[in-house]
Image: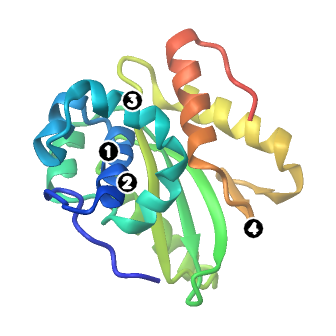
């Protein structure tokens, strides 16, 4: 796997800036905040979030999981729903997992990795693909609708505790389902 880089810098490379916009947006940063690092106008950032949404998976593999700045934003017992992906030593996907936490997402990830290794599952690395603040809603609601949608789509891959073995759950689909639920209370189809 390629070495990950810190997302909080001013990149000269346009492709990296596009990844940066999508990544920061997926972690709850506003266009005004993203402007600080990219130098793009707010209207450009809003357009790029839509135009380059398909680059989110690549962005998650490019940048560090959660940097100090993201920790600061997510600290404080918020209702968070997440999508993690776990890989073996060859970089092959083991499983995708949806879940909830009120703690730092990286702290929860460490617990998950320990859980897998204790049970003989050869997790070597993991990606935090998406973390969404559910605001006033309990995160379990968003977790439940994503779990239901993905069980419907991948019934044979589902294992208890919201894990989908051998399935690379698309981050964009996860985000769409959660945002649809939070905006309307209705689940979207995977």
Instruction: Tell me where residue 124 appears, x and y as whole percent.
Output: 50, 83
Q: Earlier in the sequence, mark 1 or mark 4?
A: 1
Residues under labels 1 and 2: Cα distance? 6 Å
Label 4 element class = loop
Out of 79 and 96, give the one closest to the viewer.
96
Instruction: Tell me where residue 47 appears, x and y as whole percent.
Output: 39, 29
| Discs 2, 3 touching: Cβ within 8 Å | no
Q: Which residue is mark 1?
A: 21
Residues under labels 3 and 4: Cα distance? 33 Å
Label 3 element class = helix
Residues under labels 1 and 3: Cα distance? 10 Å
Residues under labels 2 and 3: Cα distance? 13 Å
Out of 16 and 167, give the one closest to the viewer.
16
Q: Is residue 31 above or below residue 114?
A: above
Q: Is residue 57 above or below residue 54?
A: below
Q: Earlier in the sequence, mark 4 or mark 2?
A: 2
Closer to the eye: label 4 or 2: 2
Residues under labels 4 and 2: Cα distance? 25 Å
| Discs 1, 2 touching: Cβ within 8 Å | yes
Q: Earlier in the sequence, mark 2 or mark 3?
A: 2
Tell me what residue is drawn at x 15 percent, y 51 percent: 69
Q: Label 4: few (<14), some or many (≥20) within 10 Å? A: some
Q: Which mark is residue 166?
A: 4
Tell me what residue is drawn at x 49 percent, y 65 percent: 112
Q: Which residue is mark 2?
A: 19
Total labels: the figure holds 4
Q: Is residue 94 above or below residue 147?
A: below
Q: Which mark is residue 47?
A: 3
């Amino acid at each position: 796997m390629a070495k990950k880089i810190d997302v909080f810098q001013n990149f000269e490379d346009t492709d990296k800036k596009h990844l940066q916009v999508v990544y920061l947006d997926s972690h709850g940063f506003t266009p005004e905040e993203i402007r600080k690092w990219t130098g793009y106008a707010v209207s450009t950032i809003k357009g790029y979030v839509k135009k380059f949404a398909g680059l989110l998976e690549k962005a998650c593999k490019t940048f560090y999981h959660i940097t100090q700045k993201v920790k600061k934003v997510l600290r404080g017992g918020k209702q968070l729903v997440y999508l993690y992906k776990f890989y073996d030593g060859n970089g092959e996907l083991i499983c995708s997992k949806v879940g909830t936490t009120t703690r730092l997402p990286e702290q929860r990830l460490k617990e998950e990795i320990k859980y897998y290794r204790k049970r003989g599952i050869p997790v070597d690395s993991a990606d935090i693909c998406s973390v969404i603040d559910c605001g006033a809603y309990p995160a379990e609601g968003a977790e439940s609708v994503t779990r239901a949608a993905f069980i419907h789509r991948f019934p044979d891959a589902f294992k208890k505790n919201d894990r989908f073995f051998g399935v690379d759950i698309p981050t964009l689909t996860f985000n769409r389902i959660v945002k649809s639920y939070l905006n309307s209370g209705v689940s979207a189809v995977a």
